[in-house]
């Protein structure tokens, strides 16, 4: 096989993988993974209750794809709005998307980053409400949403 498609045995990469695999065997990592999925389910449920359409109706993992066509928004516009209130998502095509890949009709949202900060299911309800306000009444609620996001980030700092 070597050297064909396989590269050299880079020891720093082998060491990094060993650390990652070791961490994945711990109970705390398993609990973290379960919390990621719980948070994603809570956020998905909150978005559905707020009137958003989710591709597949929800999520079974750490991601969800929100179809914004029923809201009259593009993925590009929603990504920009959410960025302005300090919520990071990315525009994403949805099945049978009528818009270009540079515009899209959806956004993709994941929960690993917020879970790493310690966000929980109750926080997901707040995030869902912030996303709803950003979609439905952006100009009127942008400052309020920014304040709510800042409060969540203060509650769950990157470093303590």
Image (cartoon, helix red, strand yellow):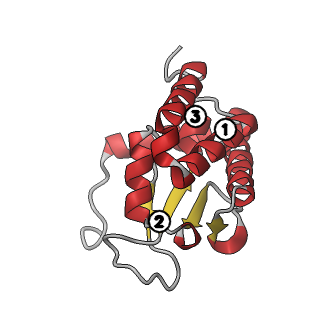
Residue 38 place in picture, x, y as percent: 74, 47
Q: Of label 3 and label 2, which has the lower sequence position?
A: 2
Disc 3 element: helix
> How far apart in space, not on screen, are marks 3 and 1 (Cα)?
17 Å
Say which quarter of the image contains residue 74: bottom left
Instruction: Please tell me whether mark 2 or mark 1 is closer to you in this view.
Output: 2
Q: Nearer the viewer, residue 31 or 90?
A: 90
Residue 76 place in picture, x, y as percent: 37, 62
Q: Of label 3 and label 1, which has the lower sequence position?
A: 3
Residue located beneath label 3 in the image: 116
Total number of numbered discs in the rendering: 3
The answer to whether 146 appears left or right of 120 in the picture is: left
> How far apart in space, not on screen, are marks 3 and 2 (Cα)?
30 Å
Residue 145 place in picture, x, y as percent: 53, 36
Residue located beneath label 1 in the image: 126
Query: Does 49 sit above or below residue 21?
Result: below
Query: Does 13 sit above or below residue 71?
Result: above
**Mark 1 surroundings within 10 Å by alpha-carbon count, few (fewer than 14), some (14 through 19), many (20 or more):** some
Residue located beneath label 2 in the image: 73
**Mark 2 surroundings within 10 Å by alpha-carbon count, few (fewer than 14), some (14 through 19), many (20 or more):** some
Q: Residue at x 64, y 67 (%)?
A: 54
Q: Is residue 15 in view from this perspective? A: no
Q: Of label 2 and label 1, which has the lower sequence position?
A: 2
Disc 1 element: helix
Q: Is residue 50 in view from this perspective? A: yes
Q: Nearer the viewer, residue 84 or 155?
A: 84
Q: Residue at x 43, y 84 (%)?
A: 98
Q: Residue at x 62, y 54 (%)?
A: 62
Quadrant housing the N terminus = bottom left
> How far apart in space, not on screen, are marks 2 and 1 (Cα)?
21 Å
**Mark 3 surroundings within 10 Å by alpha-carbon count, few (fewer than 14), some (14 through 19), many (20 or more):** some
- Contact? badges 3 and 1 (CB < 8 Å): no
């Amino acid at each position: 096989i070597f050297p064909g498609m396989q590269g050299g045995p880079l020891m720093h990469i082998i060491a990094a993988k060993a650390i990652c695999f070791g961490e994945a065997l711990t109970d705390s990592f398993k609990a973290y993974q379960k919390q990621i999925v719980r948070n994603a389910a809570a956020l998905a449920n909150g978005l559905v209750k707020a009137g958003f359409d989710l591709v597949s109706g929800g999520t079974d993992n750490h991601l969800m794809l929100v179809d914004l066509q029923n809201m009259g928004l593009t993925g590009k516009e929603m990504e920009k709005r959410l960025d302005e209130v300090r919520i990071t998502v990315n525009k994403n095509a949805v099945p049978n998307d009528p818009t270009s890949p540079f515009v899209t009709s959806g956004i993709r949202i994941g929960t690993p980053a917020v879970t790493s900060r310690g966000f929980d299911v109750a926080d997901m309800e707040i995030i869902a409400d912030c996303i709803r306000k950003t979609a439905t009444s952006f100009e009127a609620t942008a400052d309020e949403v920014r304040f709510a996001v800042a409060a969540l980030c203060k509650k769950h700092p990157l470093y303590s």
